[in-house]
Image (tube, rainbow, N blue to C red):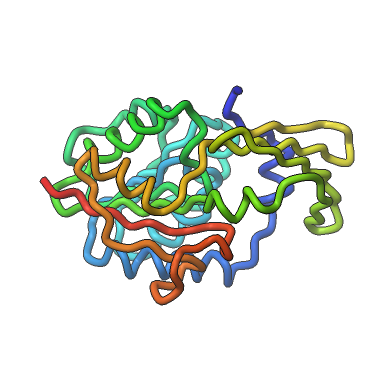
Amino acid sequence: MSHTYSRQWFTTFLGSIDESVVARETAFIVRQIGNAHSVLDVCCGPGRHSAPLAEGRYDVVGLDLDDAALRDARNRASTAAFIRGDMRQLPVAPASMDAVLCMWQSFGHFDADSNAAVLAEMARVLRPRGRLVLDVYHRDFHAARLGERTIERDGARVRERRSMSNDRLRAELTYQDGSSDVFDWQLYVPDELAALAARSGLPLTLACAEFDEQVAASDTHARMQLVLEKTS
C-alpha cells in the first residue's frame, strides 16, 4: 500500500466541509489541550484544523507527506508552519511539543509494529504532561458495515467497497471519472489502542465519540477520540 491520498480524494472529501463541523472538532481539541503553546498537527492535510488553531493562541506546526495538501495548508493558515515529513520519523526535536494531533483516521496505515512506532514517535516529541489527541475509526462499528455503498459529496458519486481481514479494514474507492484510491488501516477498539499507547508512556485520559466528552466511544459511532497524556 502506498498510504497516499490522491488529489481526487482531497477534492472530493475535504473540498467543502461544513465550517460548523470543523468548529466543533477544533473546540474539542482546544478543550483537551488547554494551555498548550506548541501544537504538532500530524497528517495535517490542507490545514483544516491547523488554521483555526493557529488563529488562536497556539504555535502550530503542520506535517504531511503530500506537497499539494501542504500548499493548500500554507494558503489557508499563513501564521502556521508547515513541513513535509513521515509520521514514522517525525522531523521534530524531542520534548518540543505541548500537544500532538492526528485526525480523521490518519493513524493505523502501517503494520502493527510500525503503528506502535508511530505512537512512540509522537510520545518522543511531546513534553512531559503533553497531550496526544487521536481521532480514529472504531473497529467494531466498521466491521459491522462491510460491502459496497455509494457516497455522494457535493453532487459527486463515489463507489466504495469495504472488506476486513482480521483487524485491518480495506476501502476501495472508485470515482466518477474512473480513477480510484485504495486504503488499508489497522483498526482498534478503545482498550487496545489505550494499551498500545501506554507502552510508549501515553496513558489514556479520555475515550469518547462525536467530539463530545460525554459520549462514550462505542460500536455505535464510526469514529472515536482518544486523549493520551505523556507521563514523563
Outermost residue toward the right in this view: 177
Provide residue 11's location: percent of width, then percent of height.
71, 45
Of residue 115 and residue 146, the one placed in the foreground of this image is: 146
Q: In this view, does 139 lie above or below 29?
A: above
Query: In the image, 151: left or right of 229?
Result: right
- Which corner quadrant holds the N terminus? top right
Of residue 192 and residue 161, the one placed in the foreground of this image is: 192
Q: Is residue 123 above or below residue 190?
A: above
Provide residue 52's location: percent of width, then percent of height.
45, 62
Residue appearing at x 22%, y 36% in the figure: 124
Query: In the image, 7: left or right of 178?
Result: left
Residue appearing at x 50%, y 63% in the figure: 218
- Which corner quadrant holds the C terminus? top left
Of residue 67 and residue 164, the one placed in the foreground of this image is: 164
Provide residue 14's location: percent of width, then percent of height.
65, 51
Residue appearing at x 16%, y 54% in the figure: 129
Tell me which corner region of the image, top left, top right, bottom left or bottom right, holds residue 26.
bottom left
